[in-house]
Image (cartoon, rainbow, N blue to C red):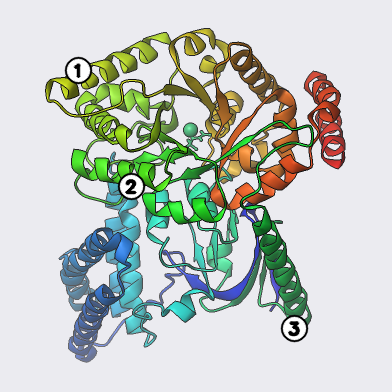
Amino acid sequence: MTFTLHGLPVSSGIAIGHAHLVSHTSLEVVHYVLTKALVGEEVLRLDAALLTTRDELSALREYRPQQAAAEFDAFLDLHLMILGDDHISHAAREMIRTEHCNAEWALKTQMDALVAQFEAFDDAYLRERKTDVIQVVERILKVLSGHPSHVAPTPQHDSEMILVAHDVSPADLIQLKPHQFCAILTDLGGATSHTSIVARGLNIPCVVGLHHARDLIKDRDMLIVDGEQGVVIVNPDKNLLAEYKLRQSQFVLERQKLKRLRTARATTLDGTRIELHANIELPTDLVQVMENGAAGVGLFRSEFLFLNRENLPDEEEQFIAYRTVLEGMGDMPVTIRTYDLGADKQLKGVTRVASNPALGLRAIRLCLAEPQLFRTQLRALLRASVHGNLKILVPMLSGASEILQTLQIIDSVKQELAVQGLAYKAEVPIGGMIEIPAAALALNVFIKKLDFLSIGTNDLIQYTLAIDRTDEEVAHLYDPLHPAILQLLAHVIGSANKANVPVSVCGEMAGEIAYTRLLLGMGLRQFSMHPVQLLAAKQRVLTTNLPDIAQLTQKLLRADDPIKINELLAKLNAL
Ligand code: PEP
Ligand code: MG
């Protein structure tokens, strides 16, 4: 039966492929009672399934992605450990013996008990591990049902598979980078959650906040994903398939055409130079950065180096990662953000989980609370600074005290390096992210003490409008055009320009071409976005005449009626 689901569009493009379900909601198993004579056989059936599952997991090692070998091994070890855990295997066996139930029911019951235990953990990382328990049980159940999991998708298969999940953490998603599914669908998540941001970086269509996709879509269902509209068509008929195949090739053609702009200078019609930089999560993203002709890296979210691992990256490992990016970019600027851990990017063993993590010990707050961890990163960054054009960006600063503490630590790390005779650039620019309303409002100290500013609209919108960016229930309230947001943006951009302090926008708003002209009209001259968005943004810059948009932008900034604001934006974009 054909049906359609609607969610939040996160990453554009059209994908046509088969559903590959992950996570637990499909675990509906029947319960039946066995006669006493069959109990022994049922235990043997369970044991055989456990052995087959163990073989499957071991065989998976052959398919591990090279770039994430360590993480992949850790993930497999964890799954093998869960498989062998008494809470699953032994307890299920006992349950079959005492309650005479079928193996599926015993497994599901044990899994539910274990998941409840994981859910009660304070530590968000541990809480998230319940997903691993579910995945392992799902694998055993598939064996019991006579439909074992595909050990690992072959590359040809991968490119036609659409990942359908209830939720995926940003850490798990980053592991998929080498896998290349052709689209991603999730029930949960907001458009600017870090999961969505990583999905966008994969350069494949992604729709989040679908609510019940994981329940309604079955494994191997044929799907059409329209990442532009946030629409998913399940089991489309021939006509729909033909229509979307056409749209898909049109989209690919458009992208292809944009490639011609790769080496063009991003200059407006009146001759103003605009800097278009790229956001990256890992050094391997440099390939995309180059392919899309970025003029620099405007945001390297360094915290992704810290995820998916048991041990933290030491100074040397970090130094190599930063040097790789700096050398890869030559003399182009590279802005590396000190780690923004906490909230939806938890670090095992270090991040303390608060009841409200987005307002908790996150980013610079965590750095200042764990200065040793911070100093290690700063040492690596400063040592790498001699290999390129580095700028250091500090996330989540709220005011003078944090700025001063940060600058003091940076100075003291420099002194330490000097004493040890280690090279670093003395004048590495230090910038601050403007992503807390307090920072935008009390901007003077940022302008006075820092070398540059970068506006994180994802958090600025989250904190100004009080909407959790990871919660799809409030995703409809996420509104970059809210007058409060527009006033804050205009204020920060205007004040920084007046004081000659470089300012950029590196939140998702920077990559949305619907807002390019508006931001240009506010005086923004530097944008940082996902590499895949760069060429479309450049095209918009190339067709904009700044004197033409000035008046309309001011009018839009004075408006407070949402309908009027949208009308004016449409006019601005139609010029
Ligand atoms: C932002 O908040 O806009 C930003 C760029 O940082 P992040 O999305 O990593 O929180
Ligand atoms: Mg942020």
Mark 3 crowdedness (10 Å alpha carbons): few <14, some 14-19, many ≥20: few
Q: Which residue is mark 2?
A: 324
Q: Which residue is mark 3?
A: 238
Mark sitting on residue 386: none
Q: CA distance from mark 3 to mark 2?
A: 48 Å
SS label for mark 1? helix
Image point (23%, 24%), residue name:
371
Q: Are marks 2 and 1 in contact (CB under 8 Å)?
A: no
x, y (%) of residue 548?
A: 85, 29
Q: Does the beta carbon of the residue at mark 3 sit less than 8 Å from ligand 1? A: no
Between 516 and 56, the residue placed more toward the observer is 516
Can you see residue 116? Answer: yes
Q: Earlier in the sequence, mark 2 or mark 1?
A: 2
x, y (%) of residue 506?
A: 55, 35
Task: Tell me the kind of residue under disc 2.
Answer: Thr
Q: Which residue is mark 1?
A: 415
| Quarter residue 88 falls in | bottom left
SS label for mark 3? helix
Name above or below for residue 532 compared with residue 417. below
Classify residue 329 as left or right of residue 119: right
SS label for mark 2? helix
Task: Tell me the kind of residue under disc 1.
Answer: Gln
Q: Does the beta carbon of the residue at mark 1 sit less than 8 Å from ligand 2? A: no
Image point (26%, 18%), residue name:
409
Q: Considering the image in quadrants, where does the C terminus appear?
A: top right
